[in-house]
Image (tube, grey):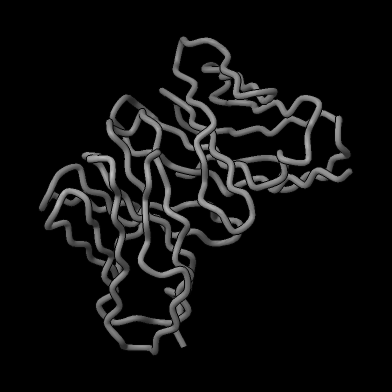
Amino acid sequence: QQPVQSPQAVILREGEDAVINCSSSKALYSVHWYRQKHGEAPVFLMILLKGGEQMRHEKISASFNEKKQQSSLYLTASQLSYSGTYFCGTEGAAGNKLTFGGGTRVLVKP
Amino acid sequence: DVKVTQSSRYLVKRTGEKVFLECVQDMDHENMFWYRQDPGLGLRLIYFSYDVKMKEKGDIPEGYSVSREKKERFSLILESASTNQTSMYLCASSLGGWGTEAFFGQGTRLTVV
């Protein structure tokens, strides 16, 4: 079952913050985050593991709440380069297939 | 840098045609994947392969097959293309299993008319 991402889309001004959530109805072992810029391939941002620490990619950080079966991606002081679609992928147990959410479109305006 | 190359960026095929989508990676990765990307549905796994000649069904394998004769090449085959297979197809590879970083190709936008 696909994880649910929210919001589906967000528009920001440069320098503003945003949070993207990824929720699953099942227990999670890991959560992966990717960003896809328009017309480009998805690019890996980070993996969060059960029991692991909060991760960071430049000024983008993420947390993983195992009890809530949810991960949050924090876009801090957003830059124009943060525009794109963000996907979370969830792994229910070590070695299980990765299942991606529907994506969150982010547009950062000057 | 890891490079995953898909043979075509755009393809237009007729209903009923047999379609081959080719993917090549240059980093000796064990695992290769084919995803389908549709608006609002994200990336859905069609098939994956963890070794030469090995393949496993993903979440939406119906209407598709795959071939992996060499480690670096993973082909997606639409045996008889239908209009509901019009989509963006993404190939990916990874060195390790599901818990490792995947590298994606730029995608093939297939239109079936």
**Point 35% across, 66% down: residue:** B7
Q: Is residue A2 above or below residue B37?
A: above
Q: Quadrant of residue A5?
A: top right
Camera-nearest residue between B4 and A106: B4
**Point 46% across, 31% down: residue:** A26
**Point 86% across, 31% down: residue:** A16
Q: Is residue A93 above or below residue B72?
A: above
Q: How many labels does the image show?
A: 0
Residue B112, percent from left and from top = 44, 82
In the picture, the quarter occupied by the C terminus of chain A is top right
Left or right of residue A9: residue B31: left
Residue B70, percent from left and from top = 14, 54
In the picture, the quarter occupied by the N terminus of chain A is top left
Left or right of residue A77: residue A71: left
Camera-nearest residue between B33 and B85: B33
Left or right of residue A102: residue A49: left
Camera-nearest residue between B19 and A52: B19
**Point 69% across, 40% down: residue:** A6
Left or right of residue A64: residue B68: left
Camera-nearest residue between B51 and B73: B73
Q: In this view, does B58 lie above or below A48?
A: below
Q: Is residue A72 above or below residue B18?
A: above
Residue B80, percent from left and from top = 28, 82
